[in-house]
Amino acid sequence: MIDETCASTEPLRGNSDWFVHDRFGLFIHWGLYALGARHEWLKGREFMSNEQYDRYFKRFDPDLYDPELWAQTASDAGMKYFVVTTKHHEGFCLWDSKHTDYKATHTPAGRDLLRPLVDAFRSRDMKVGLYYSLLDWHHPHYTVDVKHPMRYDAVYVEQDKQRQFQRYVDYMLHQTQELLTDYGKIDLMFYDFSIPAEEGFAGKGKDDWQSEKLVKLIRSLQPHILLNDRLQVPGDITTPEQYQPRSALQIDGRPVVWEACHTFSGSWGYYRDEETWKSVEVLVKMLIDNVSKGGNLLLNVGPTGRGELDERALDRLKGIGEWMRRHSQSIYGCTSAPETFVCPQDCRYTYNPKTNRLYLHVYSWPFKSIHLEGLADKVEYAQLLNDASEIRMTHGARESSMAEGAFREGRSADLLTLTIPVKKPNVTVPVIELFLK
């Protein structure tokens, strides 16, 4: 994964209605690199030749692979769609492609691994997304660039003179047609990525990928499909990677549909010894933060070489699912709150325009009161979302009497004060649901 974006400011071609409603999806990075278990870029990082990397191809046998379990785990976590790496930069294909022998059916796995996964998620009414790497470190006609594992091998680089890159582009077009013809309705395609010119190597961009031709093919096969923005031509969704935007994303002053993709730890593929795993609390806050800015979260898992989800990922997904079970109303169908609503410190607002409800996510639980500016005459009822218990409110200016044990303080007429429990609710992030008038 590399963040190289070219966002669209043109009207969307694909159907984004489901996307901006569902907000939360599962990314799956799975390939031969799971056996190396030390980052999905290990072939590139360690400058491996095809022959050296072949040891993983010969031993890829995910005997514990259970796509139904994967799909149920994602559903239980509150995810509504998924995106899987049909082919990552290594060039290995999870499906039984007619255009290569470098595929799952020719490993000890001996079967198409993509089809049962698509079927499992689709059977749970989850949308289907496919990732396809524009890079291919295995294809014989893919030329050397700054990301290629053999970029410092003079003999290999010299052989570029005999390589016909057009043959690789044709291969890529054929495989795209295959994926969008043989696997039913595909809701999203995630291409990755255009390459800068660096270290004396030529880059690869829209002209090299023949992006306009590729997009035309995709739209002709599945007109409804959403495309990401890494082909260097306008896409339907913008895809910031491994960072949280400061505000709702805009390009040239116009809002765009966007989704931040993140890992649980530092890598996308299975990394046995990686220990910088985010907590459930951090992950829940990332989801809330994105929705509060009108965006989605695509959270990645890297299954093991035996086909299981990492136990550390399972722990986090279970925790997220516990929170989502009681708080998904503040995520699904929600977006940024109206700009006139001033969010309190250490909180995030999300807003559902259809139900006209405002959701206050309290990151840091204060003592007794939360003050909401400008909402005194705009809220008719408030409750904690986790248990539907009422939150009492004080509307507008008020001076507390000394008999109440409080000192006098000035309050503006438009201030709404929420009286909250002293003890923080036993949930990862408490949410107060505000029914607007």
Image: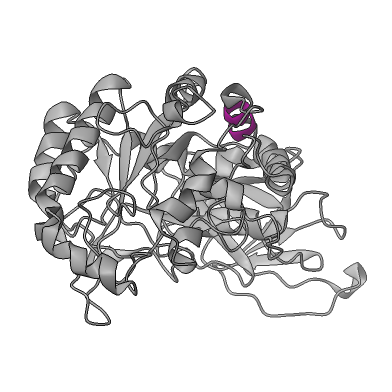
Can residue 67 be spotted in the picture?
yes
Q: Is residue 267 left or right of residue 241?
A: right
**What secondary structure characterizes most of the magenta part?**
helix
Residue 302 at what x, y percent from top left?
58, 47
| 168 or 157: nearer the viewer | 157
Looking at the image, which residue is at 82% across and 57% down? 424
In this view, 279 is above or below 152? above
Residue 272 at what x, y percent from top left?
69, 55
| 413 or 282: nearer the viewer | 282
Looking at the image, which residue is at 89% across and 68% down? 404
Q: Is residue 26 left or right of residue 6?
A: right
Residue 300 at what x, y percent from top left?
54, 49
- Specify the quadrant that holds the N terminus: bottom left
Magenta span covers which residues? 70-74
| 398 or 45: nearer the viewer | 45
- Judged from this view, the residue extending furthest toward the front is 155
Looking at the image, which residue is at 23% across and 35% down? 176
Determine the image quadrant of residue 417: bottom right
Count of numbered circles in the view: 0
Looking at the image, which residue is at 33% across and 22% down? 183
Can residue 32 be spotted in the picture?
no
Residue 374 at what x, y percent from top left?
51, 66
Q: Is residue 72 magenta?
A: yes
Q: Is residue 386 left or right of residue 26?
A: right
Q: Is residue 157 magenta?
A: no
Q: Is residue 10 left or right of residue 282?
A: left
In this view, 398 is above or below 424? below
Please name the colour scheme applied to the rendered image: one colour
| 11 or 327: nearer the viewer | 11
